[in-house]
Image (cartoon, helix red, strand yellow):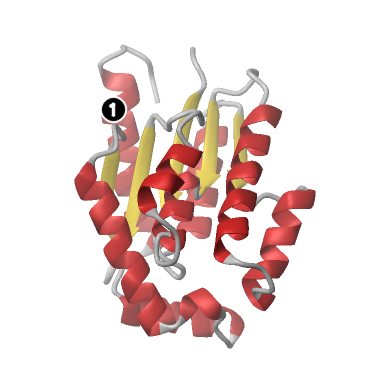
Amino acid sequence: MKVHYIVFEGIDGSGKTSICSKISDSLIERGYKVLQISEPSHSEIGLLLRNQMKNLHINQTSLALLYAADSYDIQERIEDCYDFVISDRNYLSTVAYQMMNVDKEWLLMLHQFLKKPDMIFYLDVTVEAAIERIKSRNGNIDFFETSESLLKVKSNYEKLISDGLDLKVFCIETVGKSQLIVAQNIERIIQEQLFMNGGCSY
């Protein structure tokens, strides 16, 4: 069985981290070996990026280069012994967020040699619902979490998904649905896409 690379995308407050954990736990319960990762990572580059999210003491082009470096570093570190790699974000996030200030085509070229995910789940949420989730989670918002910024990022995601980019993207509506229902819908799609045609058991 090959390693299945599945990514969860969406604006801040869309529920990516929680859904990643639920899907990873479900796969582990079924006996699969799962690596759950996130971008930015917790390596030296990733920790620098996480700090910059709050302080933004760096120009946007340099920031985009650091995000790309972190993505390549993450993929270089992944071993082939897993059945699934489940990622909270990948380079699609970098492009969606950074294209507000940096050329989109340059960003896509920067990431062109990264391994493409087998499936991307875009968790669709209204900006209003996302802001409420963010406030309830940590009590404040950062640079990329204002209503105006999130609206732009959401629009960028939709443009990228519409462009195709040779990526298999599934848009999952989350507003008004519990995380359990969202996770069940995603599990059903994984079953249909990765297992039913190949005769494997999920």
Image check: 167 left or right of 66? left
List x then y, in percent, for residue 54: 66, 76
Please identify the quarter of the rendering in which residue 79 is found: top right
In the picture shown, does residue 27 fall above or below 65? above
Residue in the picture at 51% in, 85% down = 135
Image quarter of the C terminus? top left
Residue at the spot 70% in from the left edge and 30% down from the top edge: 77
Q: Is residue 200 above or below residue 162?
A: above
**Foreground pick, 110 / 53:** 110
In the image shown, does 77 or 102 lie closer to the viewer? 102
Vertical comparison of 150 with 37: above or below: below
Number of other residues with Cα within 10 Å of mark 1, as a class: few under 14, some 14 to 19, many 20 or more:
few
On the question of residue 39 being in view, the answer is no
Q: Residue 33 appears at what percent x and percent y?
A: 61, 27
Q: Nearer the viewer, residue 144 or 33?
A: 144
Q: Is residue 94 visible?
A: yes
Outermost residue to the right: 44
- The location of residue 69, given as percent across then percent down, is 64, 43
Q: Residue at x 63, y 18 (%)?
A: 80
Describe residue 189's horizontal placement relative to residue 19 as left or right: left
The three-letter amino acid code for the residue at tag 1 is Gln
Q: Which residue is mark 1?
A: 193
Q: Nearer the viewer, residue 82 or 105?
A: 105
Q: Is residue 30 left or right of residue 117?
A: right
Q: Dot 1: what SS?
A: helix
